[in-house]
Amino acid sequence: MRPRAARFRRWLAHKGWVHVVLLAGAGVFLFPFAWMVGTSLKTDDEISEDRLFPALPSQRLATPYVRDAPEPRRPDDAPE
């Protein structure tokens, strides 16, 4: 075995498991954030479905963020 390969195997046996544990921990902490972002993008009808992110719509007429916003109108003193 070459010295570099032997050194890598030794490192993997001694410290590689730490990286595996850290990656698993990062996944545990990032999953709720991904769930929160995915849920915030869903419409009321999509919330009860079991998908993490909403389906890609063919055409979305309204977004949950501006559903109750009034229609924009031009100020009276604005030039055309």
Image: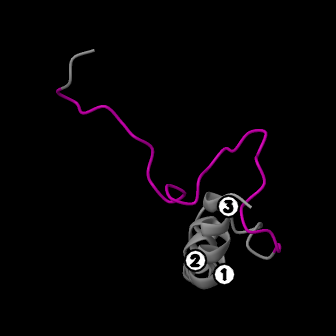
Amino acid identity at mark 2? His
Q: Nearer the viewer, residue 39 or 63?
A: 39
Q: Looking at the picture, which amino acid does disc 1 mark?
A: Ala
Which mark identifies residue 22?
none
Q: Nearer the viewer, residue 12 or 37?
A: 12
- From the viewer's perspective, is the residue at label 1 or at label 2 nearer? 1
Give the distance between the C-alpha atoms of the residues marked 3 and 1, in whole angstroms. Answer: 12 Å
Residue 31 picture quarter:
bottom right
- Crowdedness of circle 3 by 10 Å Cα count: few (<14), some, many (20+)? few
Is 44 positioned to the left or the right of 40 in the image? Answer: right
Name above or below for residue 64 compared with residue 29. above
Disc number lying in front (2 or 3) = 3
Q: Which residue is mark 1?
A: 13
> Which residue is more in the foreground, 15 or 29?
15
Disc number placed over residue 5 in the picture, else none: 3
Does 49 sit above or below residue 22?
above
Query: Image quadrant for the C terminus?
Result: top left
Residue 59, position as x, y percentages in the image: 74, 39
Residue 51 covered by magenta stretch: yes
Q: Position of residue 41 (x, y in %)?
A: 61, 61
Q: Secondary structure at mark 1?
A: helix
* First in residue order: circle 2 vs circle 3: 3
Are the residues flagged by discs 3 and 1 in contact, CB closer than 8 Å? no
Q: Judge whether 56 appears above or below 28 on screen.
A: above
Q: Nearer the viewer, residue 80 or 48?
A: 48
Which marked residue is nearer to the observer: mark 3 or mark 1? 3
For residue 19, the mark is 2
SS class, disc 2:
helix
Q: Quadrant of residue 28?
A: bottom right
Query: Does 55 appear above or below 35?
Result: above
The magenta stretch is: 49-77
